[in-house]
Each structure stands twice: as C-alpha cells, then as structure tokens.
Image (cartoon, rainbow, N blue to C red):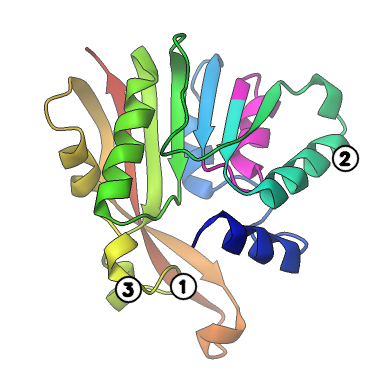
Amino acid sequence: MDAHDWDLRYAEHELVWSASPNQFVASELAELRPGRALDLATGEGRNALWLAERGWSVTAVDFSMTGLDKARTLQTGHDRGRDLRIDWVHGDVLAYDAGATPYDLVLLAYLQLPTDGRQRAVRRGYDALARGGTFFVVGHDSTNLGEGTGGPQDPSVLFTAEDVLADLDGERFEVEVAQRLPRTVQVADDHRGEASKTAYDAVVKLVRSG
C-alpha cells in the first residue's frame, strides 16, 4: 500500500488501530529511561503518544498525512496534550533523513514491506541510533499467515526476528529479545464467531554497542 492507499484507509475509520500502544511496545519499553525517540511509520501515533506520556521527546514519521492528522487530533484531545513533546513529520521512512543527532530509542512497529524495503528501513532506523540506545522492531511474523490470524496476507511483507537480525549483519549490538510472540486478538467478523484468536508477531529488542 502506498501513501494514498493509507490515507483512504485512515479516512474510512475513526481509528484503524486502538488508541493504546502496542502491547509489546508497552511491555518491553516501559522501563527505559526517557530521552529522544524516533517512531518510524507512526500511523495514527498511538506508540508516539504513549512514549511522550512517559517523558520521551518523540519524532514521529509517516507518509500518510491523514494518519498524522488523526495523531495530532489525539494529542489535542489528550489532557496533557500541550505538554507532550512530539514532532509529527510527514515523510517516507525509506527516504527520511534523521539528522546528525542520534536517538536513544528507534521504533519500527508493523512496517510491513518486501525484503529490500524492510532492510532499508531497518538499516536507516539503526543508523539513527546512539551507542547504548535501544532499537525495537515488532511486526507480523512470517508464521502468522499459516498459524495465526489477521495481518497482511502477502508472505513477501512478513518477516521473522531472525530476518531483522540478518538485516543488521556486521553491526555491533546486544540482543535482549528476538523471538516470535503470541498476541490475543479479540472477536471480529473474520474470526468465525470465536471469542478470540492468536496472532504471531516477530519482536526484536536490541541495544547498540558499536
């Protein structure tokens, strides 16, 4: 999907995603000391807002202007909206220049691209990271297509934790998490009436050491 497609999708729903952060973002990043964060492919901004609530200064980038407009609206309606430090940036993460000042945290959440695009995004994100900073990637795992529920049905845009580590071959880092994790998805029309189903995500958390 290109920026226009995402603009249309975001325009069709009040919120495509929930207003709360992704569960793995919340569980894995909650204890980090706040600093400068870069949220690539922020969408409607749920993870950026959560980070800003916790004291982070966030640069949130997305190529969908409609998604960013909804993110700004969520910030405006937040009871601490004026105090949240978020720079909403309209741009393509594959071409975005993060600047010379490195970030303490770089986040890539559900940016589902074919292999070459994913590799470029992962490298760009990692390159924006300060030594000692945290790089966090979460997305629909390759096994989700056959074993899980929801998510893209195109296997070319799915990946594993091992794929992300391979994208960073030659870099120096310490791996804290690199695995497939289950995520419970609540009732929806495409779940055949079941109370919930399980989706599988690839989750990578590492700390740059070089």
Is 205 left or right of 41, judged from the image as shown? Answer: left
Q: Position of residue 128 (x, y in %)?
A: 39, 20
Q: On the rendered structure, is 138 left or right of 36?
A: left
The residues bearing labels 3 and 1 have C-alpha atoms spaced at a distance of: 8 Å
Labels 1 and 2 touching (C-beta < 8 A): no
Q: Marks 3 and 2: in contact by CB < 8 Å?
A: no
First in sequence: mark 2 vs mark 3: 2
Q: Is residue 110 above or below residue 83?
A: below
Let me know if residue 10 is in the magenta part. no
Which numbered disc, 3 or 1, marks the residue that appears first in the sequence?
3
Tally of numbered tags:
3
Magenta-drawn segment: 41-58
In the image, residue 42 lies in the stretch drawn in magenta: yes
Q: Label 1's element?
A: loop
> In the rendered structure, which disc, 1 or 2, sits on the residue that comes first in sequence?
2
Position of 63 relative to 140 (above/below): above
Which residue shows up at 55% across the image and 14% down it?
35
Task: Identify the residue under disc 3.
Answer: 145
Q: Percent position (x, y) of residue 150?
A: 46, 72
> Considering depth in this image, is 122 or 99 the residue closer to the camera?
99
Residue 30 appears in view: no
Q: Provide the residue designation for mark 2.
A: 77
Q: Amino acid at mark 2?
A: Gly
Residue 150, numbered label: 1
Residue 25 in the image, given as x and y percentages of width and height = 50, 40
The kind of residue on which mark 3 rests is: Leu
Amino acid type indicated by mark 1? Gly
Q: Secondary structure at mark 2?
A: helix
